[in-house]
Image (cartoon, rainbow, N blue to C red):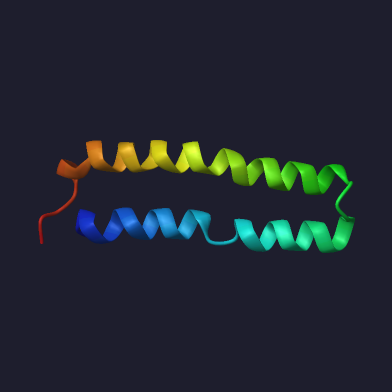
């Protein structure tokens, strides 16, 4: 799989359901629960992790096929 396809697919696949997780946590546990807090913090942590993964994907670009 070429890098131009593999890298965006990996990023989209890993981040799709965080917004849904926040909505479900709020609706099931309420705004003042620990589960909701952890879910929201997880989304906030997602951004630097995803940026790190993008940097990693760009550094390993040469390992992908050029087709």
Q: Eyeballing the image, is 57 above or below 31?
A: above
Q: Is residue 44 left or right of residue 11?
A: right
Which residue corresponds to the image point at 63% horizontal and 59% vertical from the top-left? 19
Residue 51 position within the rendered picture, expressed as x and y whole percent measured from the top left: 41, 40
Q: Is residue 10 left or right of residue 65?
A: right
Q: Eyeballing the image, is 55 above or below 25?
A: above
Q: Eyeballing the image, is 10 above or below 27?
A: above
Farthest front residue?
31
Specify the quadrant that holds the N terminus.
bottom left
Which residue corresponds to the image point at 14% horizontal and 54% vertical from the top-left? 65
Q: Is residue 55 left or right of residue 64?
A: right
Q: Nearer the viewer, residue 40 or 57?
A: 40
Farthest left residue?
66
Q: Is residue 34 left or right of residue 48?
A: right
Residue 6 position within the rendered picture, expressed as x and y whole percent measured from the top left: 29, 57
Residue 40 position within the rendered picture, expressed as x and y whole percent measured from the top left: 70, 46
Count of numbered marks: 0
Residue 15 position within the rendered picture, expressed as x and y whole percent measured from the top left: 51, 55
Specify the quadrant that holds the C terminus.
bottom left
Which residue corresponds to the image point at 45% horizontal and 43% vertical from the top-left? 50
């Amino acid at each position: 799989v070429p890098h131009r396809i593999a890298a965006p697919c990996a990023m989209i696949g890993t981040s799709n359901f965080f917004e849904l997780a926040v909505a479900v946590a709020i609706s099931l546990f309420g705004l003042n629960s620990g589960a909701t807090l952890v879910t929201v913090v997880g989304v906030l942590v997602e951004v630097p992790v995803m940026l790190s993964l993008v940097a990693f994907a760009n550094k390993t670009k040469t390992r992908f096929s050029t087709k």
